[in-house]
Image: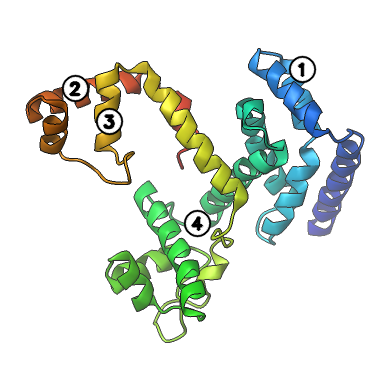
């Protein structure tokens, strides 16, 4: 039974690979032209851009191949990311579609694998904490020229070592940073790939910042300025209600009321940025 199922799966993969090979690749100029047409509502252009990049999904999916999830399932999850990327690709950024789409494809695959492999799905905040641990691990590895310990990572993040260890134990693929701790076997490198240098992620960060600024155009000037001060858009510093009031010549209470009014307005348009956020 298992042998027949494996054979059918392999045949399906071969048929899929043969099918996507028939679609020619696009030049950069063709990608930009399709983006223009997509932004004008041309669904045929969007479909063409997606079909021409199905091979990109397969290439990226190979890095996530495993025995516990079928490769075809991984590819299909990547295709969902590709579809999102095709809808959001903007020719005005003047970058190849593959560079832009890679982040969306990887995110779609990683989220799906995380949900399927994990016995208990972690809350969003813990997922974000695990990402910070991973990023700090690789940063310290480069700085120290050796693998950091749990204590070193915890100290860098300002977290308790027990909390870091608990989060690592909660993830399915890893448990510890070094062999001296009493966590399960494995290393942080098993959790996800090294993103310390990741051009597509940098592009997405830039895109998200640009989209956020356009998103804030729904607000009046004073509302927009207050949110920019409150949410660290100026030099990474979060300003207090009092300091903003002093800069703008209004009371802290007025600042608070304007901030709440602005947030209520933005909620009406939240879908514009929702896809950037880990669900």
* Mark 4 burial class by Cα count in 10 Å: few <14, some 14-19, many 20+: few
Label annotation for residue 118: 4
The alpha-carbon separation of the residues under discs 4 and 1 comes to 38 Å
| Residue 104 figure quarter | top right
x and y percent of residue 163 in the render? 30, 67
Q: Earlier in the sequence, mark 3 or mark 2?
A: 3
**Is the C-beta separation of discs 3 and 2 under 8 Å?**
no
**Of 156 and 59, which appears nearest the observer?**
156
Q: Earlier in the sequence, mark 2 or mark 4?
A: 4
Left or right, 202 with reference to 3: left
Relative to 201, residue 190 above or below: below
Relative to 237, residue 207 above or below: above
Find disc 3 in the rendering and name its residue: 227
Find disc 2 in the rendering and name its residue: 258
User: Which is in the foreground here, disc 4 or disc 1?
Assistant: 1
The alpha-carbon separation of the residues under discs 4 and 3 comes to 36 Å
* Mark 3 burial class by Cα count in 10 Å: few <14, some 14-19, many 20+: many
Q: Earlier in the sequence, mark 3 or mark 1?
A: 1
Label annotation for residue 44: 1
State which quarter of the image contains the C terminus: top left
Label annotation for residue 172: none
Q: Earlier in the sequence, mark 4 or mark 1?
A: 1
**Is the C-beta separation of discs 4 and 1 under 8 Å?**
no
């Amino acid at each position: 039974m298992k042998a027949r199922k494996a054979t059918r799966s392999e045949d399906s993969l071969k048929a899929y690979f043969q099918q996507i090979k028939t679609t020619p690749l696009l030049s950069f100029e063709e990608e930009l032209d399709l983006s223009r047409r997509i932004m004008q509502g041309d669904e045929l252009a969007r479909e063409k851009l997606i079909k021409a990049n199905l091979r990109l999904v397969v290439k990226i999916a190979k890095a996530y191949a495993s025995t516990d999830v079928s490769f075809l399932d991984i590819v299909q999850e990547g295709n969902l990311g590709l579809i999102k990327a095709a809808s959001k690709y903007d020719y005005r950024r003047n970058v190849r579609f593959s560079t832009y789409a890679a982040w969306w494809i990887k995110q779609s695959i990683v989220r799906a694998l995380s949900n399927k492999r994990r016995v208990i799905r972690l809350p969003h905040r813990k997922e974000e904490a695990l990402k910070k641990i991973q990023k700090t691990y690789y940063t310290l590895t480069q700085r120290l020229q050796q693998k950091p310990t749990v204590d070193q990572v915890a100290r860098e993040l300002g977290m308790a070592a027990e909390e870091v260890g608990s989060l690592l134990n909660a993830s399915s693929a890893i448990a510890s940073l070094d062999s001296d701790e009493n966590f399960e076997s494995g290393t942080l490198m098993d959790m996800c790939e090294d993103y310390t240098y990741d051009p597509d992620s940098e592009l997405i960060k830039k895109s998200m910042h640009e989209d956020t600024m356009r998103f804030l155009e729904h607000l009046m000037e004073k509302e927009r300025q207050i949110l920019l001060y409150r949410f660290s858009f100026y030099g990474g510093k979060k300003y207090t209600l009092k300091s903003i009031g002093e800069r703008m010549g209004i009371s802290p209470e007025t600042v608070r009321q304007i901030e709440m009014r602005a947030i209520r307005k933005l909620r009406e348009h939240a879908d514009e940025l929702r896809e950037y956020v880990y669900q």
